[in-house]
């Protein structure tokens, strides 16, 4: 919303309020003389004041009308200049009380302005301004000893006037407190959302980069091992390195594309890059998140002459929710990455079990026993646990008694 639109909206709401305040104040000032009881044609003995005729209309001086106009204008502009409007209204009230014998509802405008001050400004910024109301209302009885405080009726009037100012101030403080609490909650929610988004991207980058570098390192070791003895066997390892690095770059480009614009889309390719590279970046950013349909590609990059990955599917494969499918893929990916890093060249087994209400993902390796691994969960296991929890599932990871390591995730496929 532009500044002009906001100004028009505020005026559209405050000008009617100012008109109502002005009309009520003017009407009360005109009828400050009361009903025409005792006047010719007035009510008889024992009859209510309104039994015969209306109130007595008393006209004001031009200065009185000007004071009411100033109060109405201050109410209309109260949200633009709250302190100046309050001071102007108090000045108009002081002049009105000094020139008009009875005030009527002249305090209605200051009531509205007191609420505006309390709801728009912190306590330290408006409390001193409301204190100006005390000498203003004392000025109405400046010609009486001790400002009329010795008269119980006048003292009661002061108490009523003080209550008239305290009540809207208290309401304004409550409204401001609730508004500030709502604003802080929104800011905390935004910060929490930003943190969760950064955490999600960090998990994606960790999984992509960590897995790919582990596979590349393993395949490079295989290539170096056979290069001198069996050169013909080095080519598959080098091809795996090339394909793994290519896939990792494309997936990483798609993951980081969320930084380019607020809606996660890709920006045009920067100056100095080839058009094909920009088109490839846009295409990768539109690809769906990887799921279990790419499990064969994932395991193919790890298979080598001395390391095998077996995949076993149990149950009838069924369509999975996108979040569950992606979480299952990342859990398998990270578990295989840990097997490559810590399994000592042993093979691994991936079991995907489709059940009516859950998807069971279990990855085990045949490496040496790691008794201390259960107590040293790194970012990999923590990330897998967070992914399982994010879709309403649970994950357990730990060493096996017969050796090796096992990761088991139970992910719900229905509503939970």
Image: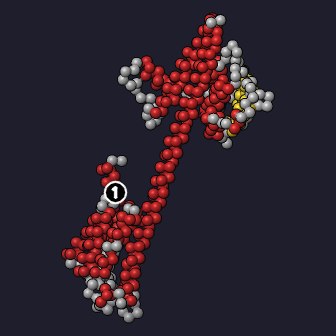
Query: Where, by quadrant of the figure, is residue 54 drawn?
Result: bottom left
Q: Nearer the viewer, residue 161 or 369?
A: 369
Q: Please tell me how many numbered marks the rendered image carries.
A: 1
Disc 1 designates what residue? 10
Extreme right residue here? Answer: 402
Q: Residue at x 54, y 41 (%)?
A: 196
Q: From this viewpoint, is residue 146 visible?
A: yes
Asked if residue 193 lies left or right of residue 368, the reply is left
Decide: is 304 above or below 413.
above
Q: Position of residue 163 (x, y in %)?
A: 41, 76
Decide: is 77 above or below 276.
below
Q: Nearer the viewer, residue 125 or 49?
A: 125
Query: Where, by quadrant of the figure, is residue 49 drawn?
Result: bottom left
Asked if residue 31 lies left or right of residue 320, the reply is left
Q: From this viewpoint, is residue 57 visible?
A: no
Decide: is 45 above or below 28.
below
């Amino acid at each position: 919303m532009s500044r002009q639109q906001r100004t028009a909206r505020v005026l559209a709401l405050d000008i009617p309020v100012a008109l109502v305040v002005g009309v009520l104040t003017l009407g009360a000032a005109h009828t400050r003389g009361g009903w025409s009881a005792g006047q010719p044609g007035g009510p008889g003995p024992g009859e209510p004041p309104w039994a015969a005729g209306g109130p007595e209309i008393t006209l004001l001086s031009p200065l009185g009308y000007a004071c009411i106009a100033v109060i109405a204008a201050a109410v209309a502009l109260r949200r633009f200049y709250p302190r100046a409007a309050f001071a102007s209204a108090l000045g108009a009230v002081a002049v009105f009380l000094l020139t008009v014998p009875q005030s009527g509802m002249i305090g209605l405008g200051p009531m509205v302005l007191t609420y505006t001050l309390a709801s728009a400004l912190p306590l330290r910024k408006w409390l001193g301004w409301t204190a100006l109301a005390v000498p203003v209302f004392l000025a109405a009885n400046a010609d009486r000893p001790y400002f009329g405080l010795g008269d119980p009726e006048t003292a009661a009037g002061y108490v009523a006037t003080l209550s008239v100012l305290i009540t809207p101030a208290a309401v304004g403080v409550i409204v401001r407190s609730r508004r500030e609490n709502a604003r802080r909650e929104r800011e905390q929610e935004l910060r929490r959302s930003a943190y969760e988004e950064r955490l999600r991207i960090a998990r994606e980058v960790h999984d992509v980069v960590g897995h790919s570098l582990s596979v590349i390192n393993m395949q490079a070791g295989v290539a170096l091992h056979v290069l001198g003895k069996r050169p013909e066997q080095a080519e598959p390892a080098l091809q795996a390195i090339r394909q793994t690095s290519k896939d990792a770059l494309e997936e990483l480009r798609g993951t980081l594309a969320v930084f380019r614009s607020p809606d996660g889309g890709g920006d045009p390719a920067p100056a100095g890059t080839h058009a094909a590279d920009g088109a490839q970046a846009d295409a990768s950013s539109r690809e769906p998140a990887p799921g279990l349909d790419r499990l064969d590609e994932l395991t193919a990059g790890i298979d080598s002459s001395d390391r095998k990955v077996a995949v076993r599917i149990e149950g009838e494969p069924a369509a999975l929710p996108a979040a569950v499918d992606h979480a299952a893929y990342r859990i398998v990916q990270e578990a295989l990455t840990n097997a490559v890093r810590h399994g000592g060249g042993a093979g691994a087994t991936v079991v995907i079990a489709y059940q009516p209400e859950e998807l069971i993902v279990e990855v085990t390796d045949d490496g040496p026993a790691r008794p201390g691994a259960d107590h040293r969960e790194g970012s990999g296991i923590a990330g897998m646990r967070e992914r399982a929890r994010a879709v309403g599932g649970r994950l357990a990871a730990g060493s096996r008694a017969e050796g090796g390591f096992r990761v088991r995730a139970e992910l719900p496929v229905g509503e939970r």
